Amino acid sequence: QDFVIPPLLQLSPGPTKLAAMAQAQDFIKGWPHPELLTNPELRSALIQSFAKSMEMSEECLNYGDKAKGAYMMGHPKFLQVLADFLAKQYGEKVEPNTLLSTGGSSMGTDMACRVHCKVGDFAVVEEPTYYLSFSIIRDRGMDLLGVPMQDDGMDIDALEKLLKENPGKIKMVYTVPVHHNPTGVTMSDAKRRRLCALAKEHKFFVVADEAYQLLNYEKVDVKPMFYYDDPADPRVFSVGTLSKLIGPGTKVGWIQAHPQLLKPMTDIGFINSGNNPVIWSSCNLINFIESGALAAHIDRVSKDLGSRCDLICKKLREVGLEVVQPKGGYFVWVQSKGKMTGRSGECMCIKGDRFGDFMRLCFCWLTTAQIEEGIEFLRQ
């Protein structure tokens, strides 16, 4: 009988060896992972919804219809179904005439700038913030001013100081008030009220980028900024999107604002000429929303991404980094102790002169194994 040599016992590599073996991963992409988009329940519900939309093809393929006229604000049925859905999600009344359908949050922000601001106006942004908002605002010929972020949202004292230093020049404040990109912070109720009071006093508009309003990993009891606005002197645009809930290719979103702010948007050249830009794509989602499939999908997405958020935060602490765990959204914001990964924070301030040692890490795109390896790479 042949003698069999037993396998050698392998010693587990220590933390330093593990870090040396680990490879950097792509924490830059703010994308959902493919498994969320290939879910059988999602595909089945969307196919059903697409088929249902063809039962009204004479409307969803046209500019409007004889009875309702042109769908400048969006298809009336979509706006009603969206209003009903949002009312259940928010626990607040939503009227269809306070909604305008858009191609997503970026389009909503751009439209607010186009209509309610002009070349040479000042816009105030948080620092750090969603860095691509800078180009949207600058494309409209506006100048940028920044205020710091605090652990309960925008520094309102700093904003008030800028307003006093630049009387009448600040026409817009852009904020990400819920699950802030990149810090994960949610603005407090007191700051929301104070921001809207300042908007009335100093006559500027608030563009609230609420892309993550419905993507929660635990209960977050905050209403959209719209509900802090005064209908007698409206100043707020609550900008929402389905991109982070269904998928970014959906390209359907909305602006929630009082009608006197929305109506001028239908005079934007591409809308006045071509009508609302998402009639067809929004009608494809009517049954998906109305049937309850969207609400069920949001629950699945929130549980999936919430577990990834737990994982990345746990792993960051294991490798010696401090992190404030977000309650929703796509990102964690972490100060480096040497090694860097993900997107550097430099681009997230106006002058690109700060936050160079901070990392914005997206936990939604990578597999759980890649998240673990990518954070292990940061171990010093």
Image: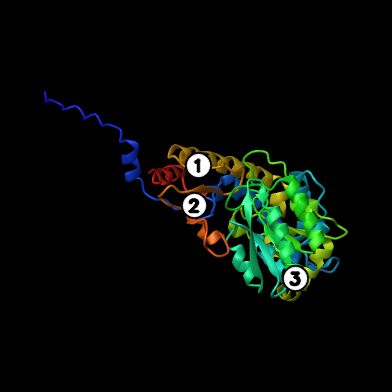
Q: CA distance from mark 3 to mark 2?
A: 35 Å
Tell me which numbered mark, 3 or 2, is placed earlier along the sequence: 3
Identify which amino acid the numbered label 1 is placed on.
Answer: Glu
Q: Quadrant of the C terminus?
A: top left
Estimate how packed mark 3 is, as few (under 14), some (14 to 19) or many (20 or more) residues with alpha carbons within 10 Å: some
Estimate how packed mark 2 is, as few (under 14), some (14 to 19) or many (20 or more) residues with alpha carbons within 10 Å: many
Which residue was labeled with disc 1? 322
Q: CA distance from mark 1 to mark 2?
A: 12 Å
Q: Which mark is residue 115?
A: 3
Q: How many marks?
A: 3
Residue 296 x, y percent position in the rendering: 66, 42
Which residue was labeled with disc 2? 359
Residue 352 horizontal side relative to residue 337, left or right: right
Residue 160 x, y percent position in the rendering: 73, 58
Q: Secondary structure at mark 2?
A: strand
- In front here: 148 or 116? 148
Between circles 3 and 2, the one closer to the viewer is 2
